[in-house]
């Protein structure tokens, strides 16, 4: 059908604002482009909605968003998971406003329509008045296609796009490595920090594989560390790299020796981790298990960015939600091990509190920088934003991917090329 | 209901003093108000009571309090550098328990922050455990229960 559509009438403005090495500031500040992104990006791909450990039992649920759509991730009595549109089929009110919890049913507060954990419409008050005009079987909460990989649950409005594993593609190898920080236990969500910043969602998207900013923006965090740890965070001149994994995904390896947390477990425990090791010893852990847990406790040596809304960032998930063209909500999700020693999970939470969230030693400085980018996007005649660092110094990895130095902008370029492709797509209806 | 007004006055004076130190960024003096084993806690879930076993926005022991102050004063943090002023109102002080060893107090706070020209307001319940010391008190525990702890907060480069 596409030959019948006049291409002249279709706005390709946003796609034109992405060049190989630069993007235009209007991508951060034009409300029309923002609305188009929700349709063309968020409604057209796999979007992260939660982790399976957040809905552990029959009756567990959590709420989330896919672009502008509120959704519920639920687990029914048979322990099957569902992703349901959070919208009553009667008047359209949300049926759940809690972040998470356990329930037997979702009941619309407006007229009392009740839905099961699988979305099926169970109860309608004064049903007799609907005789001949309503079939309950035809009005469940709308259910979305969803698939999971290593416990990460993604959902999509598109029934005809590729399977999740195909979309994740070369990122799967890195997700497999990321989950090893459970220390031999299944990865589990321990809690989350929530904050917002007055800026566009793509500013955060860029940040996850941006090592260039780290020693500058996070100087006060690095100063708060012991010398050995501070040395580890001095990675700009190291052997790290950024790899474009395709489909907008990218990985930034800051600390190559911490790619695989299960490698080199024969190494002695560094002195600065001795307090944690002793606490684990006091709990009766074996020396082998202590080495594994101590090594896993600080997370991986890489940040993995999964287009468009989630990253596996060293020791936590960073989930973004676009709220408006100039406002973005972020969740920093703390991770530990299901059934892991309490000392280990508590150490993970204290580390999370140290850097992450609205009161961490790192996040407020990121937020300050992002807010200033948004301010800057309202000014200037030129208006281009550079993402060309290391563009002529790329190399091909053993996996066949384009990569650059750790502080190159290879990851951002990968994300923006996926964005350009999606924003340039012509709807065939 | 008998109210020990002398005790309420003494405790209120201490809370006002602490509030004034924080609004005026006299952080070094603020550090001296604490017992070494004291904890400064800002929970993510106000119904939680086992703070060490759960994720908080902040759970600062002596070292973390000192590091937090260092970060705010060092000039290395861009958000602390551009942080505006805060004005906090401490009110509705109620003594929940009092003994010779400690006083448990709850009060209301409204903290206003001017940040990048915008006013941000943080209402909170604050719970203190104070221990008597030389005609005044030391803080054994301070739990700041932000009204919107579970919502999306703005980033914070000051001390509640």
Image (tube, coloured by chain):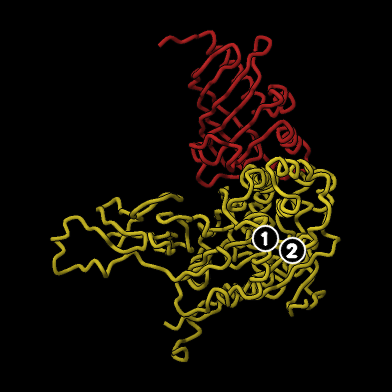
Chain colours: A yellow, B red
Q: Which residue is mark 2?
A: A260
Q: Which mark is residue A116?
A: none
Bin the neighbour count of mark 2 within 10 Å (Cα to Cα): few under 14, some 14-19, many 20 and up: some
Discs 2 and 1 share one subunit: yes
Q: Which residue is mark 1?
A: A180
**Residue A80, x across and y down, in percent:** 42, 64
Q: Nearer the viewer, residue B13 or A279?
A: A279
Who's the residue at 72% across and 58% down the image?
A300
Question: Could you tell me which quadrant the C terminus of chain A lies in?
Answer: bottom left
Q: Earlier in the sequence, mark 2 or mark 1?
A: 1
Residue A40, horizontal then vertical, whole percent: 50, 72
Q: Is residue A373 visible?
A: no
Q: What chain is tagged by disc 1?
A: A
Is residue A347 placed above or below A331 in the rendered structure? Answer: above
Q: Look at the numbered disc 1 and give the secondary structure of its residue.
A: helix
The reply to whether residue B68 is visible in this rendering is: yes
**Is A347 or B57 nearer to us in this picture?**
A347
Residue B82 in percent (x, y) is at 69, 42
Q: Give the chain letter at badge 2.
A: A
User: What's the residue at 64%, 33% (across, down)?
Assistant: B159
Q: Quick check: A196 above or below A238?
A: above
């Amino acid at each position: 059908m596409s030959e019948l559509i006049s291409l002249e009438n279709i706005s390709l403005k946003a796609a034109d604002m992405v060049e190989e090495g630069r993007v235009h500031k209007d991508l951060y500040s034009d409300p029309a482009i923002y609305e188009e992104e929700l349709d063309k990006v968020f409604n057209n791909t796999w979007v992260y909605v939660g982790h399976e450990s957040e809905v552990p039992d029959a009756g567990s649920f959590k709420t989330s968003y896919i672009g502008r759509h509120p959704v519920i991730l639920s687990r029914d009595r048979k322990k099957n998971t569902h992703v349901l549109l959070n919208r009553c089929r009667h008047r359209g009110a949300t049926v759940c406003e809690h972040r998470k919890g356990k329930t037997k049913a979702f009941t619309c507060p407006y007229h009392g329509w009740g839905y099961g954990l699988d979305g099926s419409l169970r109860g309608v008050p004064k049903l007799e008045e609907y005789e001949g005009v309503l079939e309950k079987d035809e009005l469940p909460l709308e259910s979305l296609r969803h698939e999971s990989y290593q416990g990460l649950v993604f959902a999509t409005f598109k029934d005809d796009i590729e399977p999740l594993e195909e979309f994740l593609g070369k990122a799967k190898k890195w997700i497999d490595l990321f989950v090893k920080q459970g220390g031999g236990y299944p990865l589990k969500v321990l809690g989350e920090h929530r904050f917002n910043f007055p800026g566009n969602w793509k500013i955060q998207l860029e940040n996850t594989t941006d090592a260039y900013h780290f020693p500058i923006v996070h100087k006060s965090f690095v100063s708060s560390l012991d010398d050995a740890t501070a040395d580890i965070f001095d990675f700009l001149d190291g052997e790290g790299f950024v790899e474009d994994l395709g489909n907008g995904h990218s990985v930034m390896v800051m600390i190559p020796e911490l790619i695989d947390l299960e490698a080199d477990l024969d190494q002695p425990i560094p002195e600065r981790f001795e307090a944690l090791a002793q606490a684990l010893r006091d709990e009766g852990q074996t020396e082998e298990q202590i080495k594994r847990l101590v090594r896993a406790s600080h997370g991986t040596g890489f940040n993995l960015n999964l287009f468009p809304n989630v990253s596996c960032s060293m020791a936590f998930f960073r989930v973004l939600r676009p709220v408006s063209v100039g406002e973005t909500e972020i969740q920093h999700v703390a991770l530990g091990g299901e059934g892991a020693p309490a000392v280990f999970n508590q150490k993970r939470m204290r580390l999370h509190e140290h850097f992450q969230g609205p009161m961490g030693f790192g996040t407020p400085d990121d937020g300050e920088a992002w807010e200033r980018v948004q301010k800057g996007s309202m000014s200037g005649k030129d208006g281009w934003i550079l993402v060309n660092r290391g563009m002529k110094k790329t190399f091909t990895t053993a996996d066949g991917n384009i990569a650059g130095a750790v502080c190159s902008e290879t990851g951002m370029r990968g994300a923006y090329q996926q964005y350009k492709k999606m924003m340039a797509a012509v709807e065939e209806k | 209901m008998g109210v020990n007004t002398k005790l309420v006055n003494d405790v209120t004076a201490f809370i006002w003093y602490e509030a004034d130190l924080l609004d005026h960024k006299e952080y070094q003096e603020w550090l001296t108000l604490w017992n070494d084993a004291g904890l400064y806690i800002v929970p993510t879930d106000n119904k939680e009571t086992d703070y060490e076993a759960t994720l908080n926005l902040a759970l600062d022991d002596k070292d973390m309090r000192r590091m937090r102050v260092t970060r705010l004063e060092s000039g290395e943090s861009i958000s602390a550098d551009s942080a505006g002023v805060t004005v906090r109102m401490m009110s509705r002080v109620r003594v929940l328990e009092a003994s010779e060893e400690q006083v448990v107090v709850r009060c209301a706070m409204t903290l206003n922050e001017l940040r990048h020209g915008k006013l941000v307001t943080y209402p909170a319940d604050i719970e203190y455990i104070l221990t008597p010391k030389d005609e005044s008190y030391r803080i054994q525990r301070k739990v700041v229960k932000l009204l919107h702890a579970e919502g999306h907060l703005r980033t914070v480069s000051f001390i509640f």
